[in-house]
Image (tube, grey):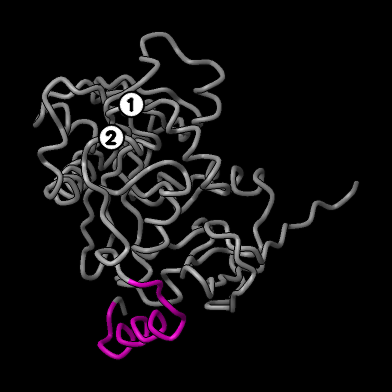
């Protein structure tokens, strides 16, 4: 049997530049895991990506349940749900006006459904979810009464299950984009499911303001790491303009974006900040080590 090798890409997935250098390199899950940083836009990505089926196997081996600390199905669900709802509230706090009553919201990678539950209960949004982890999809359906498709976004687009609208007022990607192997193609397909005046909410780990040490930040399943500028540029390439941004210090980066042509003003490059370089990002990680974070 022919051995399938991992692909190596030294071209920036956002701006296409081949000017890059290694930011972090280590072996994870038996594989080389090398993160490059683009010398032009500051995008950080894994240059030694495994075949898609390797990641699929990784996710389906109890990964998601382990991340949340759930045991034997729904044991510990109440505590996890309380924590996730609280975290969802924190992330959405700066975007409250975006969640109009009755808005149709689709979350891709909805997890156990905490964010959708919060939007449904607090803002009276109409919500739907897509979740590839079967156990999470079942919990969302049976315990929270949410309409969640058990499968990937690709499977959902091919099958389009009954009861799901064709387009949405809001689409949510909460801690999802960093897992996507082809972010440009993915976001362009997501755009097709958004109303012309719709908005997309994205939350990703911020590589310029990490809350984890370097060895904990660059994990196997994260194939992209975004700075504010790199995310701004990626979205622009995919036909979106960021209209609002919030960067936790340290922590995640949250943005609300719309399609070009919509009336709201785009956040310009000066507001986002200049492309980040390797030395600045490494200084942030060293500061965490110095102050003993996450030991």
Q: Residue 113 versus residue 65: which sits nearer the camera?
A: 113
Image disc number at residue 117: none
Q: Which residue is mark 2?
A: 262
Q: Dot 1 surroundings within 10 Å: few (below 14), some, or many (20 or more)?
A: some
Query: Residue 271's quadrant in the figure?
Result: bottom left
Instruction: Read off the magenta span.
Output: 274-293
Task: Tell me whether the residue at label 2 lies in contact with that at label 1, contact meaning CB atoms closer than 8 angstroms.
Answer: yes
Q: Residue 42 versus residue 282: which sits nearer the camera?
A: 42
Image side of residue 50 versus residue 274, left or right: right
Residue drawn at (19%, 39%), measured in percent from left and top? 78
Say if the magenta span includes residue 126. Answer: no
Q: Earlier in the sequence, mark 2 or mark 1?
A: 1
Residue drawn at (23%, 62%), measured in percent from left and top? 247
Image location (x, y in percent) of residue 60: 54, 41
Residue drawn at (52%, 57%), measured in percent from left and top? 14
Identify whether 284 is placed above or below 226.
Answer: below
Identify whether 291 is placed above or below 226.
Answer: below
Q: Which residue is mark 1?
A: 196
Identify whether 272 is placed above or below 174.
Answer: below
Q: Residue 28 versus residue 99: which sits nearer the camera?
A: 99
Is residue 192 visible in this depiction of the protein?
yes
What's the magenta bit mostly, secondary-structure-wise? helix
Image location (x, y in percent) of residue 31: 66, 65
Image location (x, y in percent) of residue 11: 64, 63
Query: Residue 162's quadrant in the figure?
Result: top left
Secondary structure state at the residue bearing disc 2: loop
Q: CA distance from mark 2 to mark 1?
A: 7 Å
Image location (x, y in percent) of residue 85: 17, 42
Q: Residue furthest top?
A: 162
Image side of residue 291 versus residue 179, left or right: left
Residue drawn at (54%, 71%), measured in percent from left and top? 38
Identify whether 146 is placed above or below 93.
Answer: above
């Amino acid at each position: 049997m022919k051995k399938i090798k991992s692909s190596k890409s030294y071209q920036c997935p956002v701006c296409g530049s081949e000017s890059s250098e290694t930011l972090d390199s280590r072996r994870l899950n038996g594989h080389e895991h090398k993160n490059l940083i683009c010398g032009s836009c500051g995008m950080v990505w894994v240059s030694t990506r495994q075949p898609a089926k390797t990641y699929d196997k990784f996710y389906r081996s109890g990964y998601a349940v382990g991340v949340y600390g759930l045991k034997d199905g729904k044991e510990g669900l109440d505590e996890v749900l309380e924590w996730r709802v609280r975290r969802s509230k924190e992330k959405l706090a700066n975007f409250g006006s975006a969640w109009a009553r009755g808005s149709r919201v689709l979350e891709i990678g909805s997890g156990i459904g905490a964010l959708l539950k919060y939007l449904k209960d607090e803002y009276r949004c109409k919500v739907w979810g897509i979740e590839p982890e079967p156990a999470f999809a079942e919990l969302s359906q049976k315990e929270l009464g949410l309409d969640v498709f058990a499968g990937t976004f690709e499977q959902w687009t091919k099958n389009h299950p009954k009861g799901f609208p064709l387009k949405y007022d809001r689409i949510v990607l909460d801690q999802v984009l960093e897992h996507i192997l082809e972010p440009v193609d993915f976001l362009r397909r997501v755009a097709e499911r958004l109303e012309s005046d719709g908005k997309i909410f994205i939350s990703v780990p911020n590589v310029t303001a990490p809350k984890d040490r370097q060895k904990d930040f660059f994990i196997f399943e994260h194939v992209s790491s975004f700075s504010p500028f790199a995310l701004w540029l990626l979205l622009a390439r995919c036909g979106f303009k960021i209209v609002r941004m919030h960067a936790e210090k340290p922590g995640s980066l949250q943005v609300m974006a719309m399609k070009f042509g919509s009336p709201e003003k785009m956040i310009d490059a000066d507001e986002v900040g200049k492309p980040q370089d390797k030395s600045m990002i490494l200084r942030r990680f060293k500061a965490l080590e110095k102050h003993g974070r996450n030991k």
